[in-house]
Image: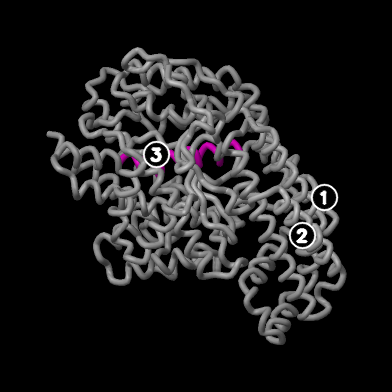
Amino acid sequence: MEKIKQRCEIDDSYKWDLSKIYSSNDEIKSDLNRVLLLTEELCSYEGHLLTSSTNLLDAINKYYEVMRLIDKLVVYANMKHHEDMSINSNLALVKRIDSVCDKVFSDISFFTPELLKSDYSLIDSYMKENEELKKYYFVLKDTFRTKEHTLTKEIETLLASLGEIFRNPSDTFDMIDDVDMKFSNIKDSSSNVVELNNSNYSKYIESTDRRVRHDAFYSMYNSYDSLKNTISSTYKGNLKVDSFLAHTRKYDSPMQMSLDDDNISVGLYNKLIDTVNKRIDLLHDYMSVRKNILGLDEMHMYDLHVPLIKDINKNYTYFEAKQLIIEALKPLGDSYIKDLTNLFNSKCIDVYNNKNKRSGAYSWGSYDTLPYVLLNFEGSFNDVSTIAHELGHCMHSFYSNKNKEYHDASYPIFLAEIASTVNEILLNRYCYLNAKDKNEKLYYLNNLMEHIRTTLYRQTQFAEFEKIVHTKTFNDEVLTCDDLCNIYYDLNKKYYGDSVVSDDIIKLEWARIPHFYNSFYVYKYATGISIACRIASDILNNKENAVANYMKFLSSGGCDYPLEILKSVGIDIENDSTIDDALDMFGEALNEFKKLIK
C-alpha cells in the first residue's frame, strides 16, 4: 500500500527554509514584545491624532511599523503550522500570535474612527503642510472613502476583540478538512491499495481507468456526506458572521461589503454571472464533445477530469517542471527570468506532500521576506501548471515589494489571481507551440479548455452559489443542509447541461470548497483569468508595450484602486469585452480541438 511520508522522510532540498524568517523562539518573542511596545506607543496618540500634521505622520508611521511586524509573525507561524498540522506546538504558536493580533487590533481600533472624525479637508491641508505625509495620500483617501461604514470607537473596539470568534468557522473547517477528514482507501488501476487524501485525489480522479476515478469520487464525497451536518453548521456560521458585519457596517449586502474592500461595484460581479450564463452553451458544447470522445453512453461528474488525449499524459520530475516553466516564461523578458531563477534557488518552495501537511498550494510571504510557496507536487502536468501559477503570485509580490513602500506594496485581492494565471496560459501556449505531433496539440488545447472551464465557468458557478446563499442569510431566510445541497445541485445541472449526469452526491461539492470561508473571493478567479487572457494574448502577439505594461502592473502593488491600475495598462473590465474575449478564447480552442480530433 502506498503510504504518505512523514515530513522527516522528505529530503531537505525539497523543503522550504523558514529559519530565514525566524531562526529561534527568542527572535519570535522579541518581535512579539516589540509589537506590544509599538502598540502602546501608538495608543498614546489617542485623542491627539489630529492635533498636528506631525502627530498624524508619526502615528501613521507607527501604525505601519506594527502591521509590518504582525505580517511577518503571522506568515511564519501559519506556514510552520502547515508543514504538519498535527504538531500542537505549531498550532499553539498560531493561536498565540492570533491572540496578540486580536489584542493589538482592539487596542488600536481608535485609530480609524478618530481619523474620520475630521473632514478630509483637514487631512488635505496637513499633506500640503507636511511633505512627508503625501506618501500616504492613497491610503488616507481610501480610508475616507469608507467613512460611512466605519463605526464608533467603542463598536470598532468590540468588533476587533471578536476576531477569534469570527474566524472560528474557517478555523473549524480547516481542521475538519485537513486533519479529521479521512477518505476510505481505494485500489489503483493495478489493484494496489491506496490511501486517498486531498492531495493525491486529483491523480486518481484523472485516471483513465473509469473504475478508479469512480471509486475516488465516491470515497471523497461519501466522507463529506458523513460530516455534512457538521460542515453545514460550520458554513452557516460563516454566513451569519458576514451577515452580521454587513448589517452592522450599514452595507446593502455581504457582497457589497466584501467587494467594497477593493472598491469594486456589485455591478461587475453581476456582469460576470450574466455574461457567463449567456454563453453557457459553449460549456454545454464542450461537454457533448467530451462525452463523444470518451465514448460514454452516460457521462458522470467523475468523468470530467480525465484527459481526453491519453498518450501524452506524462509524469514530470520537479527538476523537469522547473526547466519547463523557465522556458515557457521567457516571453516575459530576461529580467523576469533572472529573478524567477533566483527564487527557485532560494529554499522558498516546499515541494512534496507529507503526513498532515496542509492540502493544496499557495504563495505567501511578507514585505520583509521572500515569497514562499507551498506545494503538494505529484508530477502531473497540472502540478507543473500549479507551480507556474504560484510563482506568478510570487513574482507579483516580489516586484511590488521591490518597487513600493510597505503601505503601497500589498496588491488588492481583486488583482491577486492575474499574474498567476498569465503564467499558466504562457506555459500552455509554449507546450502547444512545441508539441511534437497532433496528439500533443490536442492535449494542450484540452488543458486550456479545462483551465477556462474550471477557472471561469466553475468559479462563476461558485460565485453564483455564494450570491444566493448570502442573500438568503442576509434576508433572515433559514438555510438547512438540504437547502444548501439543493441550491448547489440546481446550479450544477444548469452549468453542465444535458450531456452530463449530475450525480446526486455532487450536491455536496459546496461542502469541500475552503474558499467559501473567504467570502466572495472565488469570483476573482473568474475575472482574473479573463484579464490574464487579455494580457497573455497581448504579450504573445507582440503588442507594443505589452511586456512593459505587464511589468508595470506587477510593480504597482496597491498604489491605487485595482480597476484604476488595470486601466493604466489598458484594461477596463467593467466596460470592455474582456470577459467575452476570454470566452472567445475557450470557443476558439474548442473549434480547433474539433478540427484536429477528426
Inspect the image, locate mark 3, and give the three-letter code of the amino acid beneath it.
Thr
Q: Is residue 452 magenta?
A: yes
Where are the magenta residues, as a range? Answer: 449-470
- Residue 19 vs residue 52: left or right? left
Say which residue label 3 marks: 454
Say which residue label 2 marks: 34
Q: Main secondary structure of the magenta part?
A: helix
Rate crowding at label 1 as few (under 14), some (14 to 19) or many (20 or more) other CA atoms within 10 Å.
few
Inspect the image, locate mark 2, and give the three-letter code of the amino acid beneath it.
Arg
Q: Which mark is residue 158?
A: 1
Check the image and report above or below for 58 versus 529: below
Rate crowding at label 2 as few (under 14), some (14 to 19) or many (20 or more) other CA atoms within 10 Å.
some
Earlier along the polypeptide chain: callout 1 or callout 3? 1
Find the residue positioned furthest to the bottom.
Answer: 129
Distance from Cα at disc 2 to Cα at disc 3: 44 Å
Task: Decide which of 118, 486 is in the foreground and name it.
Answer: 118
Distance from Cα at disc 1 to Cα at disc 2: 24 Å
User: Residue 335 location in percent, x, y?
Assistant: 36, 66
Is residue 468 visible in this depiction of the protein?
no
Q: Is residue 70 magenta?
A: no
Rate crowding at label 3 as few (under 14), some (14 to 19) or many (20 or more) other CA atoms within 10 Å.
some
Residue at point 41%, 14% (across, down):
193
Instruction: State the SS at label 3.
Output: helix
Inspect the image, locate mark 1, and give the three-letter code of the amino acid beneath it.
Leu
- Residue 590 vs residue 561: left or right? left
Residue at point 36%, 44% (across, down):
385
Check the image and report above or below for 51 versus 468: below
Check the image and report above or below for 58 versus 573: below
User: Residue 330 location in percent, x, y?
Assistant: 29, 59
The image shows a total of numbered marks equal to: 3
Q: Quarter-wise, where is residue 447 in the image? A: top left
